[in-house]
Image (tube, grey):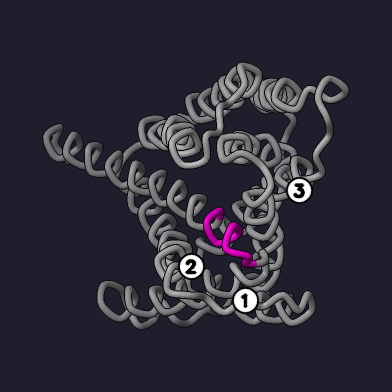
Amino acid sequence: MDQTHRNRDTIVGCFWMAVAACCFTAMGVAARELHLSGFSTPNIMVWRSAIGLLLAIVIILCFARLSDFGTKQKKGHVVRNCVHFVGQYAWFYALGLLPLVLVTSLNATVPLWGAILAILYLKEKVTMQRLVVIVLAFAGVLIILRPGAVPFHHATIVSLIGAIGYAGSMILAKQLTIKDSPMTVVFWMMLIQLPMAIFFSFMVQEWVWPGWSDVLPIIVVGSTGVLAHFAMATGMSKADATIAMPVTYIQFPLVAAVGYFLYTEIPSIFTGIGTVLIVAANWYNIARKG
């Protein structure tokens, strides 16, 4: 590939990573709006999976291969989606109780938990790089939460549990994509998580039927999940990780701006410092791999 094509792919890849960051921001705002309308977390998960499943089917039928509907790794998809369901559930739950930028910052600790899980689950070696990532990200979490200095809120722990769930699902997804396409992983994610969400909605008995004002947030929650995964997979396939991944950091100023203008949420200086450390851990991890 010549330099011109490589530069063009890099630009395209960065564009898609920016789209993914915008999708995650939009999904967070839509979930917050549904919480404010009285929707429970399982309720939101049902709509997210139902709309997402329909969109995944349309994308596969129009732009992918029919073989993307099938998989020989059904057990692996079930295990991965049980873990991902925990992460997604915790993230949506925390969005209803904590400032947007705080949830986003805590969710950025995924590389911290990913490094730990890679050591424990994949039996990868303890390297200086992983130790630096773990120390920087953990320090960022402590600065943000300041245990003992600020009142404790249980949703912060739930948010961190969500980040652990996302980290575990990413490791499992990495194994699944050896044989399955990213679109197959997304399709089975929605297919498996829809009945799970319906079951939990039945258990908590907090079902809320949407009004007309809820239609747009529901569509956004359902569509952005699929589009974010599709955009991220496309972006990573076009540009080097050292260039593509840092583009997603635009999510932090986006979320901070949205939180301020929509909900009058002003991030503390400690949240800012902690987020910088967590982003630094992410950047170091990506740069060393590059």
Amino acid beneath label 1: Val
Q: Which mark is residue 98?
A: none
Q: Is mark 2 on a helix, strand or loop?
A: helix
Kindly identify the residue that appears in the image at 70 percent across and 45 percent down.
159
- The residue under label 2 is 186
In 3D space, how far apart are the residues under numbered discs 2 and 1 (Cα atoms)?
Answer: 26 Å
Kindly identify the residue that appears in the image at 50 percent across and 30 percent down.
286
Q: Which of marks 3 and 2 is nearer the N terminus?
A: 3
Image location (x, y in percent) of residue 80: 66, 65
In 3D space, how far apart are the residues under numbered discs 1 and 3 (Cα atoms)?
Answer: 23 Å
Magenta-span inclusion, residue 35 = yes
Q: Which of marks 1 and 3 is in front?
A: 1
**Badge 3 density bin: few <14, some 14–19, many ≥20, Cα 10 Å:** many
**Badge 1 density bin: few <14, some 14–19, many ≥20, Cα 10 Å:** few
Q: Which of marks 2 and 1 is in front?
A: 1
- The residue under label 3 is 158
Pointers 1 and 3 in contact (C-beta within 8 Å): no
Q: Is mark 1 on a helix, strand or loop?
A: loop
Q: Can residue 180 be seen in this snapshot?
A: no
Predominant SS of the magenta segment: helix
Q: Residue 208 carries which label?
A: 1
Question: 227 or 77, which lies in front?
Answer: 227
- Which residues lie in the magenta part? 32-39
